[in-house]
Image (cartoon, coloured by chain):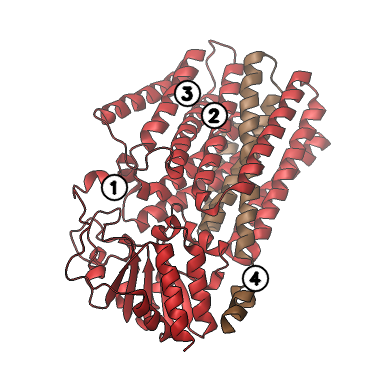
Amino acid sequence: MMSPLMAVVSLSYLISAGCYVIGLHMMRTPKSARNGNRLSAVGMVLAVVMTFVIALQKNEATLISWLLLAVALILGITYGAVKARTVKMTDMPQLVSLFNAVGGGAAAAIGAFDYLSQPNGEHLALAFSIPVILDMIIGGITFSGSLIATGKLAGKVSGKPITFPGAKLLNGVVVLIILVAIAMTVGFASSPWILTIAIVASLVFGILMTIPIGGADMPVVVSLLNAFTGLAVAMAGFVINNQILIIAGALVGAAGTILTLQMAAAMNRSVVKIIAGGFGTDDGGGAATTDIPVDVKTTTADDIGVQLAYAKNVMIIPGYGLAAAQAQREVSDLANLLLAHGINVNYAIHPVAGRMPGHMNVLLAEVNVPYEQMKQMEEANAMFENTDVSLVIGANDVTNPQAREPHTVITGMPILDVDKSKSIVVIKRSMSTGYAGIQNPLFANEKTGMFFADAKKGLVEVIAATKEYLEE
Amino acid sequence: MSQQLFTNFAIFVLSFLVGFEVISKIPATLHTPMMSGANAIHGVVVVGSILIALEAQSALFYVIAFIAVFLGAINVAGGYVVTDRMLTMFSKPKPTKNSAKDGDDK
């Protein structure tokens, strides 16, 4: 029979879990999303408060425990909140990745704590040994892997795939060590050595797994590590027999899994292939041509201004080049100028535009682009036939019609059907290829005008020109 | 398999399925805030961290517990704050109402 207090605590945990599920559910529309996140936060506060209730009731903790708990909480909350308040929206992917790292690290630490609490040299029950070793390994991989991903996204670690001779062999050895550690934990008596080996091997594996992955595959990796963190937290829940950790961890695991699969599908690559090595490593394309081929038609800001001023429907296709040039503000200025003169403007957003799932939408929302104007791929593709001018800014592979043809590296990749619109303008710095390393026939299309410029400077000129024609 | 492990495993599987159902209905436009929100939710790991911290009795365990609580606290606080910040941007007033339009019409 449960004590009344424990019944209250258990019930509160259940309410918390409900808050997470309903909170996530409310994230399906931008209107309710903010309250959804707040509901989830309420559930979190409730769970933490109830945890302190248990602790106070048990009353077994030492003074040092309370002190270190207070200090760690204050430091962690302050650091997390300050980071969250100050991060730039373009840097969002690395922050999410950092939170994956700390979540995975905390889960691994819980596993290590409970493993070491067991009497040394004793056989562990399966109900404990399986989750505890999985917790430490998944948590360890997530911790180091996410830190490398954070470094890559922040430009502190090279974004290019890093490979070295013998990498595959080393990977194999590390995986073998991890498997041995799992077998030892499950089948043999516990020992601090097994723990040390398991943690070191999983940290090394996390690094080895992330460094060969190229910049373009980052959305997939961040999603995958998000799923891993969820799993690690759920495993920690099994270890300490706490259902709220299991439920929340499983929810996040599901979220990460869905995003990983969707991102991989949007890039036309299998998750296994992405983990096995970067895009850039197997294209064999050698030096990408940066010369302007003769059959490409260049255009001027003035000409683009005329086209835009006399258009009815304009579609903007933003790519990573736009975010890299920090030109979101200019794009929304141009859109507002056109909208103010009764021209329809929408944005066609490919799922992998940006560096994490949905990143481009956040960047546009930051400069006040209304949610209704952000069209997802399928919706946008239905609109291109009635589009007078498509303005491609810093996007490449996601508009490449070669994806519809057989036997190219991007065959089958879902793309934006920009070539169906009546006229196309591409603002791009040079003819250099995208991550896929192949030429884009869209640029040589007879309807296409290329405007070679940095996205920001180019847009400022286009805005000035458009203004003249609109106000004539 | 012990009864307790089985119960926990059932909870895990069902929660995963619920998560799959709920999250597959979220539009791609909101994927970044959703992921960040999910990130905040796995900040619940701080609950586990607090529980072990209060069981610690010796130096090694104090250190491990401190790390667990510190990392968990970063996760939970940062996760919710940044998600809220992002979602504010999605519910801002439409730009057609602000002064940019009036300025251009002069």
What residue is pinned by disc 4? Answer: B93
Distance from Cα at disc 3 to Cα at disc 4: 49 Å
Looking at the image, residue A63 lies above or below residue B26: above
Marks 4, 1: nearer the viewer: 4
Kind of residue indicated by mark 1: Phe
Marks 4, 2: nearer the viewer: 4
Kind of residue indicated by mark 4: Pro
Report whether B42 appears left or right of A320: right
What residue is pinned by disc 2? Answer: A108
Distance from Cα at disc 3 to Cα at disc 2: 8 Å
Q: Quadrant of the C terminus of chain B?
A: bottom right
SS at mark 4?
loop
Q: Are marks 1 and 2 on the same chain?
A: yes
Residue lying at 59% horizontally and 75% vertically, measured from the top left: B100
Q: Position of residue A312 (x, y in %)?
A: 43, 85
Q: Residue A414: which disc?
A: none
Q: Are marks 3 and 2 on the same chain?
A: yes
Quadrant position of residue A437: bottom left
Q: Camera-side residue: A278 or B26?
A: A278
Distance from Cα at disc 3 to Cα at disc 1: 29 Å
Marks 3, 1: nearer the viewer: 1
Asked if disc 3 and disc 2 are in contact, CB closer than 8 Å, the reply is: yes
Report whether A141 appears left or right of A244: left
Label 4 resides on the chain identified as B
SS at mark 2?
helix
Asked if disc 4 and disc 2 are in contact, CB closer than 8 Å, the reply is: no
Residue lying at 40% horizontally and 52% vertically, measured from the top left: A261
